[in-house]
Image: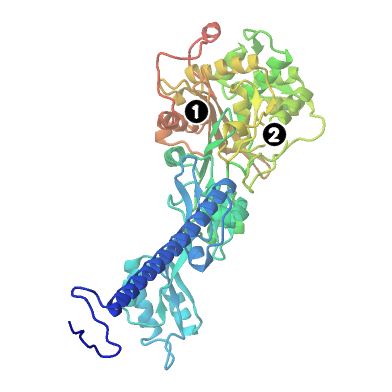
């Protein structure tokens, strides 16, 4: 068999066999695929690692901030979202003051690079603006537009007003979006809140007190919480306004105080001002107005003005005498004839009979008997009681406007002691009176008033002024005044109100002004377990048909409290219950029911 001859270098390939070059190519493709998969896996792992790292960092930061309460710098974008000034809210979180972004009307005389600053004449532009803002002063607007000086024409305008300004076609009238201080409740609680001026600085109220807190990073992100309840505040202001209108009073003031903690639930001074639009006249009066006894609307009558508060002091005198032991029997009778002390005569407004016991003295409001009780107590002990109630110093509350009492220094002579016993010769603020009545009814502990919402652990221990037994007896006596005496028009069925009226002549040049009264009703409720003190005060009320032509507290301040308590009681968790009341059965026989005096 002859062998076949092959060309040199040629290799025979069996049928069905794969050429070596093809195998090598396939191996190369497999290697490329494996490398691609490896690269993809590495990239996926790298991306996953980045996400894990970011997540760990974020989680760590959140944990740190949550544990420390710290804040971090947010940069320009973040800071733009944070208000320049923190919120002020009431005890339930309702906003009372906050920053708000609004449009303003600004005159920019350089808006047009060529030609005059205005397309139309200043008079034509002013007339156009008056059609949008009728309360603008035309002469002042023309003067501003003619001066060529940039400045605000009006702050805080509505978007639709900005659109109407735009329609005037004046490039020099700009309406930048700016941040301003806004008070959603208007004039409500204005004397507590104060206001912020155009430079962003707080004045007169808690805006001034909280200045550093509200402008700090912490304060800008966390609201300042007041003790006020805006529902109670609204009701107080409403009832005081009604009382002013009914009695034609020139002013009014009032406070609602938690008797156990000292927290102020409401504090009002009327007339009020609108902190959204503060006018110069709100903060000052003319010399002639000051001479006539007028005060600016921004003046706080409750914490800054001192008054002789009249017969509201009589329960304090009785409490001091009970603790001192100079009164041991409430049925003891005292002479009620006019009392002559040196050149002075102490008298009552009407004849109350030959003698009165202590409950009758309080119910009929006898100056003569109160003076004798104070005289027997003595000036030193009465003065010490008043000092324990803080009546020798400015009222303790956070507000900057706090009046200093007219306090008789040195040893009190006999006549001074007797007049202070029935509320003359010592002038204090209505807030002094409110904290004193809290001590009268809460078991005898005096605590300072506060506008900060308190945690139960933050309530101050206070100081004891009256014994618990004396406080219990005063709760009975105050309730009897409302049931049988000068406070009867404050009685509200089911709310067990107790309190005392007081009407005092205002001092003036040459003596007291007989036709100018300060009338006050100081009260607490419910008297079987007192929780809240209410003080209402009227400045120079007049006798009107609505008050049966009477000017005393029994006819104006007391009815205001009688209307107020049923409004605020349920809001504060105190529902009317006519099946309950404080037990006064051991005293009822001492008081024959009849007409009351003041």
Left or right, 538 with respect to 159, comes to right
Whether residue 521 is visible, yes or no, is: yes
- How far separated are the C-alphas under marks 1 and 2? 25 Å
Which residue is identified by label 1?
A: 554
Residue in front for this viewpoint, 51 or 241: 51
Within 10 Å of the Cα at label 2, are there few (<14), some (14-19), or many (20+) other Cα atoms? many
Q: Judging from the image, what secondary structure is the residue with disc 1 in?
A: helix
Q: Is 218 rendered above or below residue 501?
A: below
Q: Residue at x 51, y 17 (%)?
A: 528
Identity of the residue drawn at 64% across and 16% down = 468
Expressed as whole percent of the image width and height from the top left, the position of residue 378 reads: 77, 21
In the image, which disc is placed on residue 424? none
| Residue that protrudes farthest toward the front in the picture | 1
Dot 1, how many residues are within 10 Å of its Cα: few (below 14), some (14-19), or many (20+)? many
- Residue 4 occupies quadrant: bottom left
x then y, percent, for residue 206 = 58, 49
Q: Nearer the viewer, mark 1 or mark 2?
A: 2
**163 or 131, which lies in front?**
163
Q: Which mark is residue 391?
A: 2
Residue in the image at 56% along x and 18% along y: 475
Q: Position of residue 334 (x, y in %)?
A: 66, 12
Image quadrant holding the C terminus, namely top right
SS at circle 2: loop
């Amino acid at each position: 068999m002859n062998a076949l001859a092959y060309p040199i270098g040629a290799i025979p390939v069996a049928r069905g066999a794969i050429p070596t070059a093809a195998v090598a190519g396939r191996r190369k493709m497999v290697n490329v695929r494996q490398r691609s998969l490896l690269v993809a896996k590495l990239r996926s792992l790298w991306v996953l690692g980045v996400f894990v790292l970011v997540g760990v960092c974020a989680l760590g930061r959140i944990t740190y901030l949550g544990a420390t309460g710290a804040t971090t710098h947010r940069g320009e974008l973040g800071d733009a979202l944070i208000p320049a000034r923190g919120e002020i809210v009431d005890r339930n979180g309702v906003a009372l003051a906050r920053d708000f972004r609004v449009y303003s009307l600004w005159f920019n005389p350089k808006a047009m690079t060529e030609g005059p600053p205005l397309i139309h004449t200043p008079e034509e532009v002013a007339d156009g603006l008056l059609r949008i803002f009728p309360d603008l002063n035309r002469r002042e607007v023309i003067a501003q537009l003619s001066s060529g000086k940039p400045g605000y024409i009006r702050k805080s305008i509505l978007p639709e007003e900005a659109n109407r300004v735009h329609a005037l076609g004046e490039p020099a009238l700009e309406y930048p979006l700016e941040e301003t201080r806004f008070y959603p409740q208007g004039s409500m609680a204005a004397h507590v809140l104060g206001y912020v001026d155009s430079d962003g600085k707080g004045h007169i109220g808690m805006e001034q007190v909280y200045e550093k807190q509200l402008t700090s990073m912490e304060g800008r992100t966390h609201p300042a919480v007041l003790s006020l309840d805006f529902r109670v505040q609204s009701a107080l202001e409403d009832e005081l306004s009604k009382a002013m209108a009914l009695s034609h009073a020139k002013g009014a003031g009032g406070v609602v105080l938690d008797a156990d903690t000292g927290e102020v639930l409401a504090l009002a001074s009327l007339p009020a001002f609108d902190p959204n639009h503060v006018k110069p006249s709100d903060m000052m009066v003319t010399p002639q107005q000051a001479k006539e006894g007028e005060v600016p609307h921004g003046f706080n009558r409750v914490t800054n003005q001192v008054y002789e508060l009249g017969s509201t002091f009589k329960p304090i005198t009785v409490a001091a005498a009970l603790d001192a032991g100079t009164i041991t029997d409430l049925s003891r009778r005292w002479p009620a004839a006019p009392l002559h002390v040196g050149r002075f005569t102490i008298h009552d407004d009407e004849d109350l009979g030959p003698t009165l016991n202590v409950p009758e003295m309080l119910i009929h409001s006898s100056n003569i008997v109160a003076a004798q009780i104070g005289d027997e107590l003595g000036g030193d002990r009465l003065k010490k009681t008043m000092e324990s109630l803080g009546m020798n110093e400015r009222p303790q509350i956070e507000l900057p406007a706090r009046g200093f009492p007219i306090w008789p220094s040195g040893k009190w002579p006999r006549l001074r002691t007797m007049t202070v016993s029935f509320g003359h010769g010592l002038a204090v603020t209505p807030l002094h009176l409110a904290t004193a009545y809290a001590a009268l009814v809460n078991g005898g502990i005096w605590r300072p008033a506060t506008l900060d919402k308190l945690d139960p652990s933050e309530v101050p221990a206070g100081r004891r002024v009256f014994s618990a037994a004396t406080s219990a007896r005063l709760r009975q006596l105050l309730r009897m005044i409302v049931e049988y005496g000068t406070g009867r028009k404050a009685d509200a069925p089911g709310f067990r109100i107790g309190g005392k009226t007081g009407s005092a002549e205002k001092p003036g040049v040459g003596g007291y002004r007989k036709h100018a009264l300060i009338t006050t009703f100081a009260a607490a409720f419910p008297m079987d377990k007192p929780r809240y003190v209410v003080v209402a005060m009227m400045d120079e009320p007049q006798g009107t048909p609505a008050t049966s032509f009477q000017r005393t507290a029994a006819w104006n301040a007391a009815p205001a409290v009688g209307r107020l308590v049923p409004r605020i009681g349920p809001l504060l968790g105190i529902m009317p219950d006519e099946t309950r009341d404080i037990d006064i059965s051991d005293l009822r026989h001492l008081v024959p029911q009849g007409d009351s005096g003041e």
